[in-house]
Image (cartoon, rainbow, N blue to C red):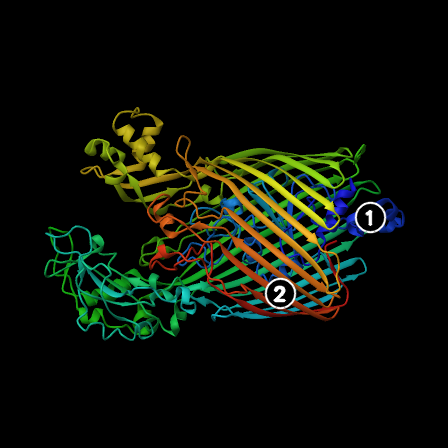
């Protein structure tokens, strides 16, 4: 039931058709309920409309499952206290987006930097995610049709679980809702930064075929898409199905002038000379020059390898180098996917409907981190160095070129096969002719990932190059290094692909996650009458389990793979919850919405529960203005990785406060007593949930029928964040305990002296063991606004205009209580997120035959490389310029069933903003914020065969 004319006015203002940006609705629903004023158009009278329906029609309508984001109550018109930003499939098409990840990463709320396929050698190159408001991806809950999807098996940044959004097919999507802020009182764990609900198509009568093909100006990345969607009503049975095929070629760094070459030669082969024991200082003093001035290697890297001098003029000798070494890195994955969806609904009678849904995606991706990651050095030798017969301390290093790898480096592509699925079976209906509705379902979602990457086997690669070094001539007792008489001519000789293959082996890995959930909901949208309308109530109970398994390959575990480590772990836990939502239109101007939920998780050694709640207000002082606000609590149950992670190794720099006090009188500790140590991170089954509080206030103003203005302020305060114990805090406590400032037998001292291990003779730190603990906190404040205007029709067509804007007012992070508060918007050592993002669009249509959309996206300034490496206020720390891109689409519809489209993304072929501080550091731009793909042009044909698609 509409509470005022405001909803109709705003819906009219927002219903532009092909409006190319996230659309903020005035309610929390994602679609109109059949028979409502929103479904019938502005000015419709719900009472009059319902009076024309037959009893059978009304009963059938009540069985229609309307997917409403952010609420348990099946009435899209009630929920307006919290904003929802929606993008439809038509808008996705008009902007030329190729994937769900592109859609969501273009949201103005996605201000955080995220890893993806450009992150050479990254942890999860075969997956993509988003960061709402600069927060960790694990704080965003992703759903399909309001149902949970499992998380990716590999860990984001090697530490936390997250949801992969790269494998969700576009052909099945009706629209995507983004709910900002806490929503745990409805959805439970993870809904802290927001909720993404991907709503698939629900009904279709006929069929639709879509064919798309395209490519990039610079080469690489060519793509093809073919999808078929079909549906029909067979008496009481409604069938909807879809299949989609996607194919995409890789983009290599050498295919873009921005990333193809380095300003100075990069190592192909070199022998670093650290001098003799008498002159050794830890710094490189020069090189052992190639005996033939690199003549034998001159053909490597397409003939660009030369005899090169160091840019450090103090270094003697030369090495073999090429400016093109980094170019053999993929910046966009080769990808192929096959997707299928099937939805069945069977109306048993006027009061009961059975349904079942299945979504399956198989995706294969291939990539390589490049030649810079494919090399050999004597890291498995004592000290990582060798010594020649002249007493010089050496480090030989060899990079393998495309001629040695073979097939222009395609022989070095790693492969990831990912199978993702979601399936449910359930029933819904009503209790007789009453207003009470019920719904019960069981859903299973899973993700099984296997990968295979070519790696150097330790014994084989060391044996191969050991033959070049020659037999050991003994050990120097003064340095502890083995002495060799290397065959330099052979070291500077190119390998054949067969020789390289002799020490390579494909190393496999796998991960498996799944979620089971059973939910029962009972609701009544006309519970009783209040002065402002009907009160509504919904309650639910649910229970299920989840699992995460990522075993480590035994070859990696046994150190048989050269230079490769891995993480592992696995386990299961059960989950149960109950929730309610109550909506009360107190009077015409004021509506109150209350919801609460209790969740309990049980795992091995862990049993945690959490109650969350939310209160929302909608106030309409007059018909054209809605004032809204809400306060909510939310939580994140400890990650499965934090509970079940196996020993995970790392290296990090720490300040040794104990040695500083005992040897340096406590002066200049960070400068003089900073050292790199090995570490070990371990799981903690005793973790508590991360908790958060958020509140928002905003308004929707529709002063005239074709204009709407929306603005919302959002505050999020997160506590008890799970993170590895801060190494700096451990080092401080260790020093205090060893100096007697804290009792030696106290629990803190026992932990600090046990976890920080020291050499018994030198007292230097040799290893640090860290556990996951609840320690960090975080705060964000943001303003999101939107303006939409629909121009009056003209002789040359209908125009619409839209602007979306988000500005981060605050993002503070505290690693541990009592520690410094870090402003992540100004401290690039901790974050390279955007402070602001703006987008806009101009749409045009004429006679249902011609249409076009011009879409504009602006990323605000972000930190340069100097700031990222050295922190704020370091000489050269600055911001790079904003990055602005334009997309344009043009569609011709010769008939009502055929659309022919030309889609151009990055219309002006805009490269990332210049950042001179990279100074030869590949890839010369922040690849977590920008890309160098350039202009993409696509042709698309969409052909409909009878009927229509709906989400009702």
**Residue 179: % across, % down:** 62, 45
Residue 401 or residue 853, whichever sits in front: 853
Element assignment for label 2: strand
Would you say 121 lies left or right of 580 here?
left
Front residue of this view, candidates 585 and 522: 585
Q: Residue furthest front?
A: 795
Q: Which mark is residue 755?
A: none
Task: Rate crowding at label 1 as few (under 14), some (14 to 19) or many (20 or more) other CA atoms within 10 Å.
Answer: few
Residue 200 visible in image: no
Q: How many marks are shown on the rendered structure?
A: 2
Where is 522 relative to 905, above or below? Answer: above
Q: Secondary structure at mark 1?
A: loop
Residue under label 2: 889
Q: Badge 1 is on which residue?
A: 43
Residue 842 point in image, percent of width and height: 64, 58
Query: What is the spatial separation of the Cα atoms under label 2 and label 1, in whole angstroms?
Result: 33 Å
Earlier-in-chain disc, 2 versus 1: 1
- Residue 871: quadrant of the picture: top left
Is the Cβ of the residue at disc 2 closer than 8 Å to that at disc 1? Answer: no
Q: Say whether residue 61 is visible.
A: yes
Give the class, few, some or many, for how many residues have Cα within 10 Å of label 2's Cα (few <14, many ≥20). many
Q: Residue 554: image x %, image y %?
A: 37, 55
The residue at 17%/64% (across/down) is: 317
Q: Nearer the viewer, residue 581 or 60?
A: 581
């Amino acid at each position: 039931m509409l509470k005022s004319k405001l909803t109709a006015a705003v819906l009219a203002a927002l219903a532009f058709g092909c409006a190319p940006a996230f659309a903020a609705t005035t309610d929390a629903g994602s679609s109109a309920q059949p028979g409502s004023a929103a479904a019938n158009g502005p000015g419709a009278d719900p009472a009059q409309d319902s009076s024309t329906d037959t009893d059978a029609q009304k009963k059938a309508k009540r069985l229609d499952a309307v997917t409403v984001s952010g609420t348990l109550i099946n009435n899209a018109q009630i929920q307006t206290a919290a904003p929802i930003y929606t993008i439809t499939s038509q808008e996705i098409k008009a902007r030329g987006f190729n994937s769900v990840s592109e859609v969501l990463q273009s949201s103005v709320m996605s201000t955080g930097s995220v890893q993806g396929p450009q992150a050479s050698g990254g942890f999860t190159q075969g997956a993509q995610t988003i960061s709402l408001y600069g927060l960790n991806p694990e704080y965003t809950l992703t759903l399909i049709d309001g149902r949970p999807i499992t998380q990716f098996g590999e860990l984001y940044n090697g530490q936390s679980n997250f949801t992969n959004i790269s494998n969700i097919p576009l052909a099945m999507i009706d629209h995507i809702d983004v709910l900002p802020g806490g929503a745990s009182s409805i959805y439970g764990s993870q809904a802290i930064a927001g909720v993404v609900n991907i709503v698939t198509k629900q009904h279709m009568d006929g069929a639709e075929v879509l064919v798309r093909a395209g490519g990039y100006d610079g080469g690489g990345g060519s793509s093809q898409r073919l999808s078929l969607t079909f549906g029909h009503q067979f008496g009481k049975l409604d069938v909807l199905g879809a299949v989609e095929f996607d194919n995409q070629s890789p983009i290599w760094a050498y295919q873009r002038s921005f990333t193809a070459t380095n300003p100075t030669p990069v190592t192909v082969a070199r022998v670093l000379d650290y001098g003799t024991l008498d002159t050794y200082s830890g710094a490189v003093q020069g090189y052992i020059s190639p005996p033939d001035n690199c003549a034998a290697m001159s053909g490597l890297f397409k003939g660009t390898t030369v005899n090169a001098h160091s840019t450090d003029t103090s270094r003697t000798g030369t090495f073999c180098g090429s400016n093109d070494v980094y170019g053999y890195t993929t910046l966009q994955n080769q990808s192929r996917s096959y997707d299928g969806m099937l939805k069945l609904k069977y109306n048993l009678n006027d009061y009961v409907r059975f349904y079942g849904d299945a979504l399956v995606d198989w995706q294969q991706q291939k990539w390589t981190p490049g030649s810079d990651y494919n090399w050999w050095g004597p890291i498995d030798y004592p000290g990582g160095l060798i010594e020649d017969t002249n007493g010089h301390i050496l480090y030989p290093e060899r990079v393998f070129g495309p001629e040695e790898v073979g097939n222009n480096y395609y022989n070095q592509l790693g492969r990831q096969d990912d199978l993702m699925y979601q399936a449910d079976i359930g029933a819904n209906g009503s209790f007789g002719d009453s207003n009470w509705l019920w719904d019960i379902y069981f859903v299973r979602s899973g993700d099984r990932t296997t990968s295979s990457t070519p790696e150097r086997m330790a014994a084989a690669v060391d044996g191969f190059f050991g033959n070049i070094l020659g037999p050991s001539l003994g050990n120097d007792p003064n340095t502890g290094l083995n002495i060799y008489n290397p065959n330099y001519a052979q070291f500077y000789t190119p390998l054949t692909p067969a020789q390289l293959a002799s020490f390579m082996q494909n190393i496999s890995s796998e991960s498996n996650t799944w979620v089971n959930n059973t939910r029962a909901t009972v609701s009544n949208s006309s519970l009783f009458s209040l002065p402002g309308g009907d009160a509504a109530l919904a309650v639910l109970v649910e229970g299920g389990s989840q699992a995460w398994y990522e075993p480590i390959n035994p070859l990696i575990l046994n150190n048989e793979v050269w230079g490769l480590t891995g993480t592992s772990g696995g386990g299961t836990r059960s989950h149960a919850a109950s929730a309610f939502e109550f909506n009360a239109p107190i009077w015409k101007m004021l509506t109150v919405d209350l919801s609460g939920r209790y969740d309990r998780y049980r795992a091995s050694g862990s049993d945690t529960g959490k109650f969350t709640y939310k209160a929302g207000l909608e106030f309409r002082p007059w018909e054209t203005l809605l004032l809204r606000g809400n306060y909510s609590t939310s939580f994140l149950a400890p990650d499965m990785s934090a509970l079940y992670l196996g020993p995970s190794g790392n290296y990090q720099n720490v300040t040794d406060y104990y040695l500083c006090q005992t040897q340096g009188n406590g002066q200049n500790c960070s400068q003089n007593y900073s050292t790199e140590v090995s570490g070990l991170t371990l799981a903690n089954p005793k973790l508590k949930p991360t908790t958060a509080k958020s509140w928002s206030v905003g308004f929707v103003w529709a002063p005239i029928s074709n204009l709407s203005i929306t603005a919302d302020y959002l505050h999020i305060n997160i506590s008890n964040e799970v993170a590895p114990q801060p190494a700096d805090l451990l080092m401080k406590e260790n020093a205090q305990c060893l100096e007697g400032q804290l009792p030696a037998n106290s629990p803190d001292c026992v932990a600090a002296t046990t976890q920080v291990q020291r050499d018994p003779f030198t007292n230097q730190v040799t290893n640090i063991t860290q556990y996951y603990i609840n320690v960090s906190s975080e705060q964000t404040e943001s303003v999101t606004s939107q303006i939409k205007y629909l121009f009056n029709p003209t002789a040359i067509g209908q125009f619409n205009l839209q602007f979306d804007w988000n500005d981060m007012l605050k993002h503070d992070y505290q690693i541990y209580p009592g520690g410094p508060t870090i402003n992540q918007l100004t401290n690039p050592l901790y974050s390279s997120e955007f402070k602001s993002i703006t987008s806009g669009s101009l749409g045009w249509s004429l006679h249902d035959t011609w249409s076009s959309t011009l879409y504009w996206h602006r990323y605000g300034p972000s930190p340069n490389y100097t700031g990222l490496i050295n922190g704020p206020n370091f000489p050269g720390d600055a911001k790079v310029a904003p990055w602005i891109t334009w997309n344009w689409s043009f569609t011709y519809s010769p008939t009502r069933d055929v659309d022919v489209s030309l889609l151009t993304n990055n219309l002006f072929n805009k490269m990332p903003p210049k950042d001179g501080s990279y100074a030869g550091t590949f890839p010369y731009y922040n690849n977590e914020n920008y890309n160098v793909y350039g202009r993409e042009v696509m042709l698309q044909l969409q052909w409909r065969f009878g009927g229509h698609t709906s989400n009702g």
